[in-house]
């Protein structure tokens, strides 16, 4: 069976993890701090904090910004549940808007959804293809007069916060700038199925405008993600520095060195090896499948955007959800794993039961109903790519001719 997205683990990674185990630093320590520095250098943002997950990063940013009951946060309907769940955790209302042709949030729909309760917009770089950040900033500027800040941080920004869910898009480019350097704050995921994995984990990339001091905010989040304790384990190793204080009721969301060790190796070869291989897989799928009139190839490069090549979202023209599901079953029977990214949020019981109706988001449903995510990962061989494409082609044509 060809897997969908196994992690990239080799001897170099294993050796680095063993080095961490032998060093005695298996919680947050020197490798985590080095990983943060390397991510900042790679993305070009101001400061980066590694955390236990992208979900934790998103929620902590919302809480820091003062999001709570009576507030609204705009999210795309087409995303993983975490994007909206973190809003619900804060007691705020996720305001869902439909997407555009590229699977990303439609800025015209954002414009319609903004009101005096809107505090944050969370655009999602779905499948690794960046959103239209300049357009999103323009929309926020147009609606600036509606913004009603609560708390000193919101007053300092004087507008809606743009918090990028960049879980899929490390290394993607928008107008010659990498993700992490496109929004006020961006959050990456390093989950096991991501382009760059640390098994679990994520990172918050701070890029706030003046008068914010991103280094001060980084230092605050260091404390915030460690129970509000003003010294981490690394700081307490200094002679006589054992005593600490707790200055706020924080959270436990730090990344340990044993995970950062994996990330350091992967980031070192990310631009040189990992992204080119993923682009090769995307290009191969495109070249083979484009000759079939039923295939809708996803956009992953244009004049201003370059994807991180995270998920290849193949769509089958003019089919129903039921037909798509049948095609997927046929592909699996041919020993190839595929997936669907994602079920739009109103299809999920929690959101459906809270009044969200998929009929209000026709583009999201239309794309969901005929999409199949194909395997993309570093160790996928050319022979396996051929097996995948043949399985897809045969399964689609069997189903369409049945």
Image (spheres, rainbow, N blue to C red):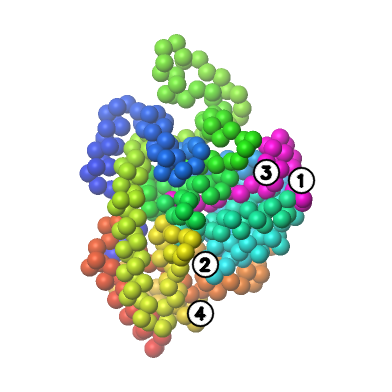
The answer to whether residue 208 is left or right of residue 145 is left
User: Which sits earlier in the primary sequence, circle 1 or circle 3?
Assistant: 3
Please, is residue 3 above or below residue 63 in the view?
below
The answer to whether residue 71 is left or right of residue 226 is right
Q: Which residue is mark 3?
A: 67
User: Which sits earlier in the primary sequence, circle 4 or circle 2?
Assistant: 2
Q: Which quarter of the image is occupied by the C terminus?
A: bottom left
For the residues labelled 4 and 3, the Cα–Cα distance comes to 39 Å
User: Which sits earlier in the primary sequence, circle 3 or circle 2?
Assistant: 3
Q: Position of residue 281 (x, y in %)?
A: 32, 64
Q: Residues within 10 Å of mark 3 (few under 14, many from 20)?
A: many
Q: Nearer the viewer, residue 162 or 389?
A: 162
In this view of the protein, can residue 397 be seen by the observer? yes
Magenta span of residues: 145-170
Residues at circles 4 and 2 in contact by the CB criterion of under 8 Å: no
Q: Which residue is mark 1?
A: 148
Q: Which residue is mark 2?
A: 102
For the residues labelled 2 and 1, the Cα–Cα distance comes to 32 Å
Q: Is residue 161 magenta?
A: yes
For the residues labelled 1 and 3, the Cα–Cα distance comes to 12 Å
Residues at circles 4 and 1 in contact by the CB criterion of under 8 Å: no
Q: Residue at x 29, y 27 (%)?
A: 23
Q: Residues within 10 Å of mark 4 (few under 14, many from 20)?
A: some
Q: Residues within 10 Å of mark 1 (few under 14, many from 20)?
A: some
> In front of the other: label 3 or label 2?
2
Q: Which residue is mark 4?
A: 320
> In front of the other: label 1 or label 3?
1
User: Helix, strand or loop at disc 4?
Assistant: loop
């Amino acid at each position: 069976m060809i897997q969908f997205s196994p992690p990239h683990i080799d001897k170099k990674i294993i050796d680095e993890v063993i080095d961490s185990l032998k060093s005695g630093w298996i919680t947050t320590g020197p490798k985590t701090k080095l990983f943060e520095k390397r991510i900042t250098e790679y993305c070009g943002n101001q400061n980066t904090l590694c955390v236990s997950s992208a979900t934790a990063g998103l929620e902590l940013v919302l809480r820091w910004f003062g999001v709570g009951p009576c507030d609204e946060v705009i999210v795309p309907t087409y995303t993983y549940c975490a994007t909206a769940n973190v809003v619900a955790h804060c007691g705020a209302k996720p305001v869902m808007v439909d997407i555009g042709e590229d699977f990303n949030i439609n800025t015209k729909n954002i414009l319609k959804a903004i009101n005096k309760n809107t505090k944050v917009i969370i655009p999602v770089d779905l499948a690794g293809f960046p959103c239209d950040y300049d357009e999103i900033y323009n929309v926020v500027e147009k609606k600036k007069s509606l913004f009603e800040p609560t708390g000193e941080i919101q007053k300092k920004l004087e507008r809606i916060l743009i918090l990028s869910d960049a879980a899929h898009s490390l290394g993607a480019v928008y107008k010659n700038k990498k993700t992490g350097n496109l929004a006020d704050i961006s959050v990456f995921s390093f989950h096991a199925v991501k382009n760059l994995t640390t098994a679990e984990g994520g990172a918050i990339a701070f890029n706030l405008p003046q008068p914010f001091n991103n280094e001060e905010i980084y230092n605050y989040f260091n404390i915030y993600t460690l129970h509000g304790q003003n010294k981490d384990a690394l700081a307490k190793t200094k002679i006589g520095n054992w005593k600490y204080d707790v200055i706020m009721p924080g959270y436990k969301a730090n990344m340990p060195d044993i995970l950062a060790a994996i990330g350091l190796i992967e980031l070192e070869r990310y631009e040189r090896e990992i992204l080119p291989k993923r682009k090769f897989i995307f290009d191969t799928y495109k070249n083979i499948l484009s000759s079939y009139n039923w295939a809708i190839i996803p956009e992953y490069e244009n004049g201003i955007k370059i994807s991180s090549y995270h998920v290849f979202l193949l769509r089958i023209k003019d089919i129903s959800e039921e037909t798509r599901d049948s095609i997927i079953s046929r592909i699996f029977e041919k020993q190839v794993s595929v997936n669907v990214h994602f079920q739009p949020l109103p299809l999920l019981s929690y959101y459906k039961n809270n009044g969200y109706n998929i009929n209000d988001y026709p583009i999201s449903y239309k794309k969901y109903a005929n999409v199949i995510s194909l395997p993309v990962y570093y160790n996928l061989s050319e022979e396996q790519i051929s097996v995948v494409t043949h399985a897809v082609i045969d399964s689609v044509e069997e189903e369409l001719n049945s």
